Image: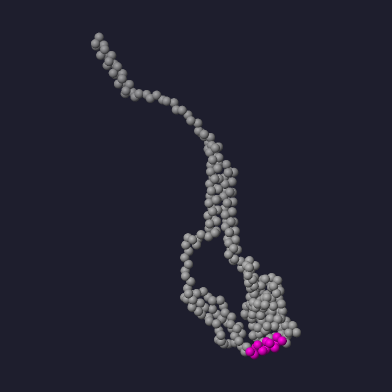
Amino acid sequence: MIQKKDIPFNKVKSLLLTLIFAITVLVFAVNIAKVSQENIIGRAFYSPIQVYGTIEPALPDGTIISFRLNGIEVLTASLKNNSYGYKEKLYLNVDDESTIEKEGYKEGDVVGVYIEDVKVADLSYFEPGPNEKYFNIPVSIRNLITIKAAYAAIERGCMPNWQCEEWSECINSIQTRICIDVNECDTEKEKPEEQVTCEMPAEKTFGIIDMITFEFILSIVLFIILMISLGFLIRKVVKEYRKGKPKKKRTRKKKVKKRKPAKKKRAVRKKKTVKRKATKKKR
């Protein structure tokens, strides 16, 4: 009996480890591709900075406080109960360093604080997230600001300061939003529109071309490389297995003479006997 030679366990183990390693590389490459693609198209998110606080001494409601960056007004609000940024949220945009253009505050920038166009202070540092900024108006300009705020209040009377939410999605060809007067003047004067008509966005159909993305192509290429490598490895293992398998020896079969059937033998004997008798009669 010829015994079969089993495939070595080490070769099977090597095959499985290679397969696991290839799959790990595939997953890692796809994840890297996703991150790099997000960075390329500029999806990095920079959270705006919230600013709020109080002013001392007391000033009339409606007094304007503003924040200016490089002389450009970036935030403005009306004082209410000597405070700002509580009911009316104020957000300072942060500059995206990955772009050339400057979109907002960058660490180290100086932001000027103005009350009724009079400079009160300079701010050079903001923490990520909420920032409470308290201002005590210097004595040297306190009278000036108080007078300007009083004149502005007289001219203003009660001027509504409307703050509106973002427009809602287009539903049944209508978009809506809510607008609130933060000065609470109890009037509809100059109130912005809260409802407009809109066009429904066309439904987007996804075809085969939409499915062909960078990650998809990379996955296909890596899968093909993985299958080719796996095929070569299996072929190598099978080849080594066949080399180690002993060959069967060929044995020649002996020729066996066929025996004539007993009936034929009897017929031949009978013919011989008949011939002998015929020969004796002739004699």
Residue drawn at x 59%, y 66% is 43
Q: Residue furthest top?
A: 283
Depth check, front residue: 22 or 118: 118
The quadrant of the image that shows the C terminus is top left
Q: Residue furthest right?
A: 140
Depth check, front residue: 113 or 273: 113
Locate residue 122: give its quadrant.
bottom right
Q: Is residue 189 above or below residue 205?
A: below
Residue 151 part of the magenta-drawn span = yes
Q: How many marks?
A: 0
Residue drawn at x 60%, y 83% is 161
Q: Is residue 92 left or right of residue 138?
A: left
Residue 249 part of the magenta-drawn span = no
Q: Residue furthest left?
A: 282
- Magenta: main secondary structure equals helix
Whole-percent x, y for residue 278 in the image: 25, 14
Whole-percent x, y for residue 24 in the image: 59, 54
Residue drawn at x 57%, y 79% is 164
Q: Is residue 260 left or right of residue 146?
A: left
Q: Is residue 169 above or below residue 246?
A: below
Q: Is residue 122 above or below residue 230?
A: below
**Which region shows up in magenta?**
144-155
Residue 6 is at least partly visible in this image: no
